[in-house]
Image (tube, rainbow, N blue to C red):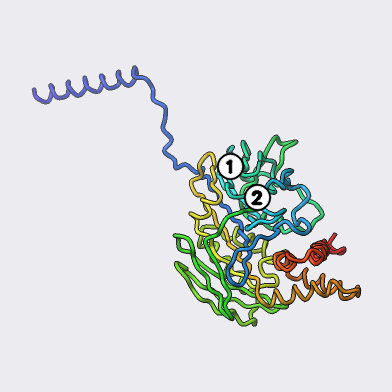
Amino acid sequence: MFTRITLRFAVAFLLAAISFTATAPKLEAQDQSPRQDRFVAHEWGTFTSVSTADGKAQLWNPLSGPSELPSFVYRSSVASQCFKGYKANLALVRMETPVIYFYSDRELRASVKVDFPRGCISEWYPLARADRQNIDWSGFVVQPGAKENFPVDQSQSHYYPARETDAAPIRLGDEQKGQQEKFLFYRGVGFFDLPLSVKLKGDQVIVRNAGQDEIAQVILFENREGRSGWRIQSALKGEAVIERPTLDQSVESLYCEIEKALVAQGLYEKEAAAMVKTWRESWFEEGLRVFYIVPRRATDAILPITIKPAPAELARVFVGRAEIITPEMERDILAAAKQFNGDSDEARAAAVNVIRRYGRFADPVLRQAGVSDEVLRSRISTLITAATARPASHR
């Protein structure tokens, strides 16, 4: 009897369950597969400053000389307003070639705004809304796997190596009339102090971290008449004394050290290699300088950034480049200024070559020398113009 009652109950329960399933509203199937779309943004750039041997930050002309950027890059039409309150074309910092890469597993639309409250945006690409203190790219499309059709010109610009990464192409505008690039690019000039100060005392360079955050790595580098050397100081919290290096090292072996430091800060290997390739001719030119990793919090304060949608990962790796005006450099430059005043074409050409060897960092030395002498100031201005003009073979 118990068995019959149990069987009847089980059958009734089963029929009721079938009836409920047939009449109940259907639920949408839930996708349990892991999401593959991951949006990542990586940025690198350089802050360049100049100081005298006693550690005093110098105003200098970061825009002197011919442009090293391709002709398609946009340039500010109000650049003169950047230097309001300062002598014409003089600034404390050159913000050089920040580029922002994007990675995604699917096509998406994004926007980026960068503020520069203590500086001025001077160049950029692709097209953006830019004014003195901010730049805004709205509605560009990240296109992983898209066919690459980037702009080029006939220049041998160091702009192009930055494309040698696995980042997704981005497009601004429609397929026919839009602009495509591998990154967002911008540049500017600034009027602010950086977190590292440098001072030369005899054969020692005193580096001091003036910020609150540890500086991950410091590299003292010197190139004198083609001979180079360097020393590496890691984890700088306060002050350190670094001996000037012996000039017996091959600069090529330093590339790997810098790339490792950049990767340790969050860049991918190809991004780090692209940064070094972009700047290796300039970073390792004649002179004494200190390279260092700018702490992320300092970068965010100097260049606040907003990216929509917010990336799952945002790396911002900036290298500080602190140029030191050495006594040897001052001596060579001032001797060249005197030589330039002579009547001999050969002597004037030799003077121009000396100034050209030191590049834009000869400018603050020459300007200081000519401050009190109007005639000398005029001649120095002529020398600077001659030295920064593009040689005929590079035009």
Mark 1 nearby-residue class (10 Å; few <14, some 14–19, many ≥20): some
- From the viewer's side, name the closer residue of 251 and 134: 134
> Residue 58's quadrant in the figure?
bottom right
Kind of element beneath mark 2: loop
| Three-letter code for the amino acid on which mark 1 is drawn | Lys
Image quarter where the N terminus lies is: top left
- From the viewer's side, name the closer residue of 193 and 174: 193
Is residue 48 left or right of 24 when viewed as pictured?
right
Q: Residue 358, how many percent across, how many down?
A: 73, 70
Q: How many marks?
A: 2
Q: Residue 69, how many percent across, how many down?
A: 74, 54
- Taking the spot 62% from the left edge, 44% from the top edge, the residue there is 133
Kind of element beneath mark 1: strand
Q: Residue 309, how many percent across, how many down?
A: 52, 39
Residue at mark 1: 113
Q: Residue 241, how many percent across, how many down?
A: 51, 76
> Residue 364's quadrant in the figure?
bottom right
Mark 2–mark 1 distance (CA, rounded to whole Å): 26 Å
| Three-letter code for the amino acid on which mark 2 is drawn | Gly
- From the viewer's side, name the closer residue of 366 and 79: 366
Q: Earlier in the sequence, mark 2 or mark 1?
A: 2
Q: Is residue 179 above or below residue 266?
A: above
Residue at mark 2: 85
- Taking the spot 70% from the left edge, 47% from the top edge, the residue there is 148
Is residue 265 left or right of 385 when viewed as pictured?
left
Mark 2 nearby-residue class (10 Å; few <14, some 14–19, many ≥20): few
- From the viewer's side, name the closer residue of 219 and 326: 326
